[in-house]
Amino acid sequence: MRESFIVAKLRNAIKNCKDKHLSPFECGQIEALHKDRHSNREIGRRLGRVHQTIANELERGTTTQLQTERTPYTAYFAETGQVIYERNRLQCARKVSCLS
């Protein structure tokens, strides 16, 4: 009985977030929780978001860096994700054609 209440509450929280973009604050939370090795599902539960939204954000903001000994590694950065998000938003506008 208790579990169904929690599931219903989570679905309601997710329903309220549908069709809304992640805020920079939420991206920072994702970065911190991801560094603490939380799963996408756990991060989604904590933020009231669907786990696939978290996965999409992690994919968008993950970049390859070089360590001091020049070995590459990948890491998620909220700032990188925000820059890519803003660039993508500029490109998603309706195309206007002028017919003379």
Image (spheres, rainbow, N blue to C red):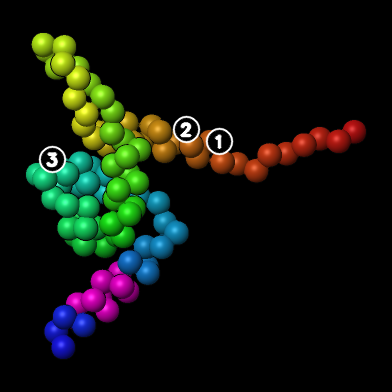
The amino acid sitting under disc 1 is Gln
Choose top left, top right, bottom left or bottom right for residue 96: top right
Image disc number at residue 54: none
Residue at coordinates 77% horizontally, 37% vertically from top-left? 97
Q: Residues within 10 Å of mark 2 (few under 14, many from 20)?
A: few
Choose top left, top right, bottom left or bottom right for residue 36: top left
What residue span does the magenta drawing correspond to?
5-13
Task: Please determine whether, in this image, residue 44 is positioned above or below residue 27.
Answer: below
- Answer whether labels 2 and 1 touch (C-beta < 8 Å): yes
Image disc number at residue 91: 1
x and y percent of residue 81 in the render? 33, 36
x and y percent of residue 67 in the render? 14, 17
Q: Secondary structure at mark 3?
A: helix
Q: Residues within 10 Å of mark 3 (few under 14, many from 20)?
A: few
Q: Provide the residue designation for mark 3.
A: 35
Q: Secondary structure at mark 1?
A: helix
The amino acid sitting under disc 2 is Arg
Residue at coordinates 90% horizontally, 33% vertically from top-left? 100
Q: CA distance from mark 1 to mark 3?
A: 30 Å
Of residues 72 and 84, the one drawn nearer to the viewer in this rendering:
72
Q: Which residue in the rendered view is the most extreme toward the bottom? A: 1
Residue at coordinates 21% horizontally, 62% vertically from top-left? 45
